[in-house]
Image: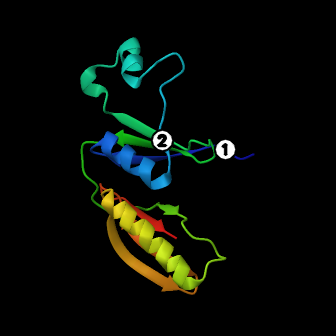
Amino acid sequence: MSRSFQVTFDALDTAALAAFWGEALGYVLQPPPDGFESWEAFADAVGIPEEDRDQLASVVDPDGDGPRILIQKVPEPKTAKNRCHLDIVVTDRSMESAERKAAIEAEAERLVALGATRGESFDEAIGTWTVMHDPEGNEFCLH
């Protein structure tokens, strides 16, 4: 039996990182629970102090297919390489090599404009990809 899952990122600025991943993946900010017009109304109802309301943020696939991305606040910045990362697929195998490279490059430029930074690019027999870093330094790849 398969299980559902979410992907969780640690962050210093949960709202900014949620906004980045929402744009990067075509996701939307997770709507508040049923019966609440906003997350602020929910926080008021359950007694979350204002100073703690930035502890979590999340984005979800608007079609309901992909996993939820949860961003949780931590006190320290990222200090080491990720042991796990996301691969964002922007190409398909039917594309010619030059077309794949152009699609990856276009997406890399779009994400840099949103605050990502570019790492190394690879064009090997097993595939073509570019390593990227989100605004807090977490690695991900564009394929």
Quadrant containing the N terminus is top right
Mark-to-mark CA distance, 1 and 2? 22 Å
- What residue is at 57 percent from the left and 46 percent from the top? 67
Question: What secondary structure is marked by label 2?
Answer: strand
Where residue 20 appears, x then y in whole percent? 37, 50
Count of numbered tags: 2
Earlier-in-chain disc, 1 versus 2: 1
- What residue is at 45 percent from the left and 46 percent from the top? 8
The residue pinned by badge 2 equals 28
Instruction: Please say whether residue 50 is visible from this viewpoint.
Output: yes
Q: Residue furthest right?
A: 1
Instruction: Check the image and report above or below for 6 versus 138.
Output: above
Q: Is residue 54 left or right of residue 64?
A: left
- What residue is at 40 percent from the left and 48 percent from the top? 9
Question: Which mark is drawn over residue 3?
Answer: 1
Q: Which amino acid type corresponds to the residue marked 2 in the rendered image?
A: Val
Question: What secondary structure is marked by label 1?
Answer: loop
The one nearer the camera, 13 or 40, is 40
Quarter of the figure with residue 63:
top right
- What residue is at 39 percent from the left and 44 percent from the top? 18
Q: Which color scheme does this rendered protein use?
A: rainbow
Q: Residues within 10 Å of mark 1 (few under 14, many from 20)?
A: few
